């Protein structure tokens, strides 16, 4: 009967508009939820086949939730180093559980990048879900297999106490005086004393340079020059190998000659102090009692062959122009930084940094088909299609926006306007129910 159909059609309208109102309420309540994607109702007719063109049987309406997950929210600046957003396509990968060395939860995806450190040092979001990334090995590489979620690891930045980097190179620029008189005696140094063994002759020029050992302690390497022939300088490199405060004759680590061309440029091919395997290498055999890595190898750079960009020989005073060595003394962990390529880097107060992880971005053919989960995350669903993991800024993936958060895609003015329309539609559906009820009452009164 059409009146009963109208009654139930009105009821379906009330149900649909109630659900629509619920979505509007959810949107408004999540106005300040990071990365929230607005939901809205799409209405579909319900048709009752009357089997005849002369009769009409009301069906009603149903509402279906639709979320535009791929809509980009506005990016807002944050003061937290672990707050991140995505500019463009893609999702961060999280896992719901980690205890304590094995992942036993569900992989999920999110654009809500508000992460903080938990008591164990793991980065988690407001729902306690673990941020996942590719671990970077000692050579600075990420896994070659990048299509599987199983190669991802929960990002932990809490286990870093400090770091030190040993010196591996020593570069020196200077000049040795061309008019220096040649020393005619035996050029055998008493290492560290700055004097010749025969006659205690002082070298014509010497300098000391700080380097860093494998445990972050600062040590000293010295180099001395004595002119023994035209354009030729006997050279010795020495160090306090047992750290007893003095340098003895047995603590010379390398000796040879430095030879110059007639134009004052260095001749590295004829300079025996720059020979060896590998060339230019200085091997420093620290005493085993020091408990540091021994020998420590330094790459000695005195300039380019035939040029004056390192050591030169001109007729001016012997002098050191500059020196440069790598390596850093021990430094404590001070914080973490995340860049737009997704690298998670630990920072130390000695000026060094260490890349720990790289964040992948997951993309889907139809991100609007993902299943919503608590904590503003999404789960894999058939409607979303296959996922792919990309490095930030490659392929269809966007870039990571460090120090930013993605705002909710909720327009408060639009929500209030929809609320008014929904309220009116709800009232109108209620009116059809009361009107159909009155009409049914009339039919019932016919019996009287």
Image (spheres, grey):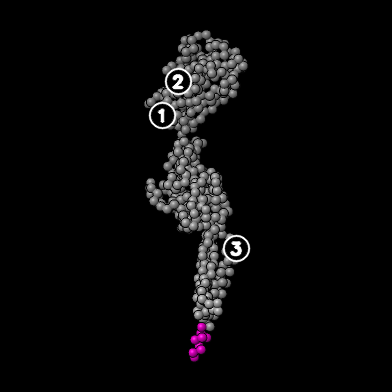
**Where are the magenta residues, as a range?**
440-448
Of residues 385 and 409, the one drawn nearer to the viewer in this rendering: 385
Disc 2 crowd rating (10 Å Cα; few below 14, some 14-19, many 20+) is some
Q: Which residue is mark 3?
A: 413
Task: Give the side of residue 401 with respect to residue 157, left or right.
Answer: right
Q: CA distance from mark 3 to mark 2?
A: 77 Å
Q: CA distance from mark 2 to mark 1?
A: 17 Å
Q: CA distance from mark 1 to mark 3?
A: 67 Å
> Residue sitting at 46 percent across and 17 percent down?
191
- Kind of element beneath mark 3: helix
Q: Are marks 2 and 1 in contact (CB under 8 Å)?
A: no
Q: Which residue is mark 1?
A: 292
> Residue sitting at 53 percent across and 70 percent down?
45
> Residue sitting at 44 percent across and 26 percent down?
296
Q: Main secondary structure of the magenta part?
A: helix
Disc 1 crowd rating (10 Å Cα; few below 14, some 14-19, many 20+) is some
Q: Earlier in the sequence, mark 3 or mark 2?
A: 2
Q: Earlier in the sequence, mark 1 or mark 3?
A: 1
| Any part of residue 336 in sight | no
Q: Which residue is mark 2?
A: 253
């Amino acid at each position: 009967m059409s009146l009963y159909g109208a009654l139930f059609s009105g009821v379906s309208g009330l149900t649909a508009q109630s659900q629509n109102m619920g979505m509007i309420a959810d949107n408004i309540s999540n106005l300040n939820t990071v990365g929230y994607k607005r939901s809205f109702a799409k209405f579909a007719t319900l048709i009752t086949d009357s089997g005849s063109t002369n009769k009409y049987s009301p069906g009603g309406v149903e509402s279906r939730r639709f979320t535009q997950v791929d809509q980009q929210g506005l990016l807002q600046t944050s003061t937290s180093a672990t707050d991140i957003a995505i500019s463009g396509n893609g999702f961060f990968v999280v896992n719901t559980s980690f205890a304590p060395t094995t992942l036993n939860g569900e992989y999920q995806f999110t654009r809500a990048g508000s992460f903080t450190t938990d008591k164990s040092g793991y980065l988690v979001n407001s729902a306690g879900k673990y941020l996942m990334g590719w671990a970077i090995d000692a050579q600075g590489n990420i896994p070659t297999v990048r299509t599987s979620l199983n190669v991802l690891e929960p990002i932990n930045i809490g286990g870093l106490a400090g770091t030190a980097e040993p010196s591996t190179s020593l570069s020196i620029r200077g000049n040795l005086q061309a008019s220096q008189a040649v020393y005619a005696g035996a050029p055998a140094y008493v290492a560290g004393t700055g004097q010749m063994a025969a006659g205690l002759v002082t070298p014509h020029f010497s300098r000391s340079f700080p380097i860093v050992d494998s445990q972050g302690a600062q040590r000293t390497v010295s180099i001395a020059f004595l002119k023994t022939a035209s354009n030729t300088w006997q050279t010795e490199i020495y160090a306090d190998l047992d750290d007893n405060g003095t340098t003895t004759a047995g603590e010379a680590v390398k000796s040879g000659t430095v030879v110059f061309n007639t134009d004052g440029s260095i001749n590295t091919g004829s300079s025996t102090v720059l020979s060896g395997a590998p060339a230019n290498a200085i091997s420093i055999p620290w005493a085993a009692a020091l408990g540091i890595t021994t020998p420590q190898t330094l790459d000695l750079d005195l300039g380019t062959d035939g040029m004056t960009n390192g050591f030169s020989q001109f007729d001016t005073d012997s002098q050191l122009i500059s020196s440069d060595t790598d390596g850093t003394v021990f430094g404590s962990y001070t914080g973490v930084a995340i860049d737009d390529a997704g690298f998670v880097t630990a920072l130390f107060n000695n000026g060094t940094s260490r890349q720990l992880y790289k964040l992948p971005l997951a993309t889907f053919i139809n991100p609007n088909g993902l299943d919503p989960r608590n904590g503003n995350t999404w789960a894999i669903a058939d409607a979303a299609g296959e996922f792919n993991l990309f490095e930030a800024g490659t392929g269809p993936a966007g870039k990571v926006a460090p120090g930013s958060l993605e705002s909710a895609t909720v327009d408060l003015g639009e929500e209030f306007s929809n609320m008014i329309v929904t309220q009116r539609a709800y009232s109108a559906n209620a009116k059809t129910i009361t009107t159909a009820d009155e009409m049914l009452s009339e039919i019932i009164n016919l019996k009287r």
